[in-house]
Image (cartoon, helix red, strand yellow):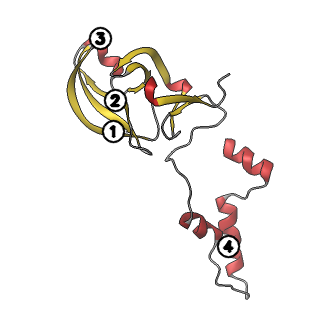
Amino acid sequence: SCLAMLQQCHQIPSIEQVQQSCNSSSASPDTSEEPCPTDMVKMTKSKTFQAYLPSCHRTYSCIHCRAHLANHDELISKSFQGSQGRAYLFNSVVNVGCGPAEERVLLTGLHAVADIYCENCKTTLGWKYEHAFESSQKYKEGKFIIELAHMIKDNGWE
């Protein structure tokens, strides 16, 4: 994984190694009152997003806060229309919250959809297809629409 390569290249200890060194040092007679580094990591955690996609892949991010949204490999179609212009259909997304489902008549018929928003900045990004009422539209169920107006390409786009 990318994390393992970083740890090797920069000689960064894993959480398990830090915990192990804390446990072994606490058994020594020279016990100090300093907290274990893993406890400090928990307290000073600076992670902004719930999930980070691997930096070795092309990704799409929120244009407003740069939270990762989707891996390019999850893109199904670029030929969708959102309320603010073109939109992409994705198989799966990250760092996205879901509102309540409601029935809407879209260009392709009646669907039950739920608005999706960026978990970091709370901007509405598009919607999730919860249910398609027409058999020709069933392939959309469980998939996500993100409007181009709300995302930017990141990592490895030339």
Total labels drawn: 4
Per the model, the C-alpha gap separating discs 4 and 2 is: 45 Å
Residue 113 in the image, given as x and y percentages of width and height: 27, 28
Element under disc 1: strand
Residue 48 in the image, given as x and y percentages of width and height: 52, 50
Q: Tag on residue 128?
A: 2
User: Which of these two is toward me, 65 or 75?
Assistant: 65
Rendered position, 38 above or below 145: below
The residue mark sitting in front, 3 or 1, is 1
Q: Give yes or no for contact between labels 1 and 4 (Cβ–Cβ under 8 Å).
A: no
Per the model, the C-alpha gap separating discs 3 and 1 is: 24 Å
Q: Residue at x 79, y 55 (%)?
A: 11
Rendered position, 5 above or below 86: below
Residue where numbered disc 1 is placed: 98
Residue where numbered disc 3 is placed: 136
Question: Which amino acid type is marked by label 3?
Answer: Ser
Q: Residue at x 45, y 45 (%)?
A: 120
- Sequence-wise, the earlier of marks 1 and 2 is 1
| Outermost residue, bottom side | 29
Element under disc 2: strand
Residue where numbered disc 4 is placed: 22
Per the model, the C-alpha gap separating discs 4 and 3 is: 58 Å
